[in-house]
């Protein structure tokens, strides 16, 4: 699973094969890998690399087949097994260091193709300039070994040759000038003979199957390494930007969430602060009133009983009290208005039946050390035998 994922990330699911043939045209085919099957996605013919680049997806990788006049091919029978001896047998006096070679062997039959390194390298650079990365290449008709097992017919045509089979081995390749137009069924896919070689190249990339021997394995390894670096760099940028955008998006949502929470907390704090100020003001008012009540209760509990008891003991039998008010309220009690009382004052009202004893009682009250002053507010006749009265007693400050 990991290998498949790595392959997909590296190569994608579209593979391309390109052939430069001896008809001075360029054949291109796109194969698409879908799970366990391969389908032909597109194919076309062009005259120049520019036209090929226009017809392919951007940054498409491709397998290149060089099969035109710059390639020399020989088909020989030999008992030799070493590549160098086979090359010298096919091409005497060949300067191997100047050429790329590829050998496809089937028993004693060998299909040998060679091409100058400078020619192939220039082609690869030209494709790179047009945004097409070459990840591998083949010379002449040697790549037919990839599709040989899939074709049941004893003979088949490529773009410039007739290939003869014996059982599953290729036993002959003859170059032809007049190539008929034919199609072959390869595992359910209809492929034109002019596109057999690019099809084989793309398929070899998918199957990772190469049975030929060449001296450009290191070159292909370098090409694939360069492609991996480009691919990794582009994917890294893509995933990197995507990752950064994802982080920014997550950061935005988190910031937005925290911002809303902070704003809500600020509003709550503002409300709480306002409520706190109101509570503090109310507490101050309550504390003030509580102090007043405590003072009144304190005074009442400490002195009122004493004052009332002393006045009651001083009363003669001829006096009858109607009311006694200690620190009387001076105004009506109203909501949200402080209670006002006449401090250090006692109001007494009642009925007297003897004026002389009334006067003596007042004198007795004035002699008490805690009474500052006694004022007769009212003394009038109520009947022949009794008189109503009211007094205001000013007591000393506690």
Image (cartoon, rainbow, N blue to C red):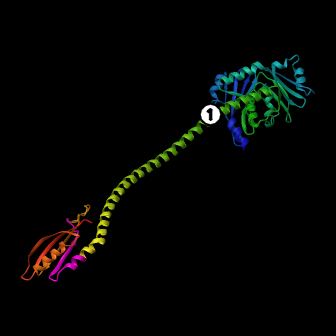
Q: Quadrant of residue 217?
A: top right
Q: Position of residue 263 (x, y in %)?
A: 44, 47
319 magenta-colored: yes
Q: Is residue 38 visible?
A: no
Q: Quadrant of residue 209?
A: top right
Q: Position of residue 143 (x, y in %)?
A: 79, 30
Q: Position of residue 105 (x, y in %)?
A: 86, 30
Q: Residue reaching furthest left?
A: 384
Numbered marks: total: 1
Q: Nearer the viewer, residue 5 or 234?
A: 234
Q: Is residue 28 left or right of residue 301?
A: right
Q: Nearer the viewer, residue 162 or 392?
A: 392
Residue at 81 percent of width and 18 percent of height: 98
- Measured along the vertical axis of the image, is residue 31 above or below residue 64? below
Q: Quadrant of the N terminus?
A: top right
Q: Which residue is mark 1?
A: 237
Q: Position of residue 308 (x, y in %)?
A: 24, 75
Residue at 92 percent of width and 26 percent of height: 80
Q: Is residue 125 visible?
A: yes
Q: Residue reaching furthest top?
A: 93
Magenta segment range?
A: 309-330
Residue at 14 percent of width and 82 percent of height: 318
| Label 1: which secondary element | helix
Q: Is residue 203 left or right of residue 168?
A: left
Q: Residue reaching furthest right?
A: 79
Q: Quadrant of the C terminus?
A: bottom left
Q: Residues within 10 Å of mark 1 (few under 14, many from 20)?
A: few
């Amino acid at each position: 699973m990991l290998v498949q994922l790595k392959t997909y990330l590296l190569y994608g699911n579209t593979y391309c094969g390109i052939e430069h043939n001896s008809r001075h045209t360029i054949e291109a085919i796109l194969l698409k890998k879908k799970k366990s099957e391969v389908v032909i996605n597109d194919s076309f013919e062009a005259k120049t690399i520019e036209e090929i680049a226009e017809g392919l997806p951007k940054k498409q990788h491709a397998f290149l087949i060089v099969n035109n006049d710059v390639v020399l091919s020989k088909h020989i029978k030999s008992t030799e097994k070493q590549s160098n001896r086979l090359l010298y047998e096919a091409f005497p006096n060949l300067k191997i260091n100047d050429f790329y070679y590829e050998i496809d062997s089937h028993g004693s039959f060998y299909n040998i193709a060679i091409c100058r390194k400078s020619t192939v390298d220039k082609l690869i650079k030209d494709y790179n300039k047009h945004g097409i990365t070459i990840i591998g290449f083949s010379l002449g008709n040697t790549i037919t070994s990839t599709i040989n097992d899939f074709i049941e017919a004893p003979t088949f045509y490529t773009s410039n040759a007739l290939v003869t089979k014996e059982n599953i081995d290729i036993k002959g390749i003859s170059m032809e000038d007049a190539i008929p137009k034919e199609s072959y069924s390869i595992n359910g896919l209809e492929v034109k003979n002019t596109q057999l070689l690019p099809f084989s190249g793309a398929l070899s990339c998918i199957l990772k199957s190469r049975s030929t021997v060449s001296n450009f394995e290191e070159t292909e390894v370098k090409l694939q390494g360069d492609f991996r670096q480009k691919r990794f760099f582009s994917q890294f940028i893509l995933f990197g930007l995507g990752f950064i955008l994802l982080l920014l998006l997550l950061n935005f949502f988190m910031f937005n969430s925290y911002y809303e929470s902070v704003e809500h907390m600020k509003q709550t704090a503002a409300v709480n602060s306002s409520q706190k100020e109101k509570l503090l003001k109310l507490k101050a008012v309550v504390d003030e009133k509580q102090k007043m009540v405590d003072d009144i209760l304190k005074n009442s509990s400490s002195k009122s009983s004493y004052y009332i008891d002393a006045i009651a003991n001083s009363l003669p039998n001829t006096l009858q009290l109607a009311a006694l008010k200690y620190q009387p309220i001076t105004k009506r009690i109203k909501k949200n208005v402080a209670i006002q009382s006449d401090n250090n004052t006692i109001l007494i009202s009642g009925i007297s039946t003897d004026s002389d004893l009334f006067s003596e009682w007042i004198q007795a009250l004035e002699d008490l050390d805690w009474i500052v002053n006694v004022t007769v507010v009212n003394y009038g006749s109520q009947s022949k035998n009794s008189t109503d009265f009211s007094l205001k007693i000013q007591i000393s400050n506690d």
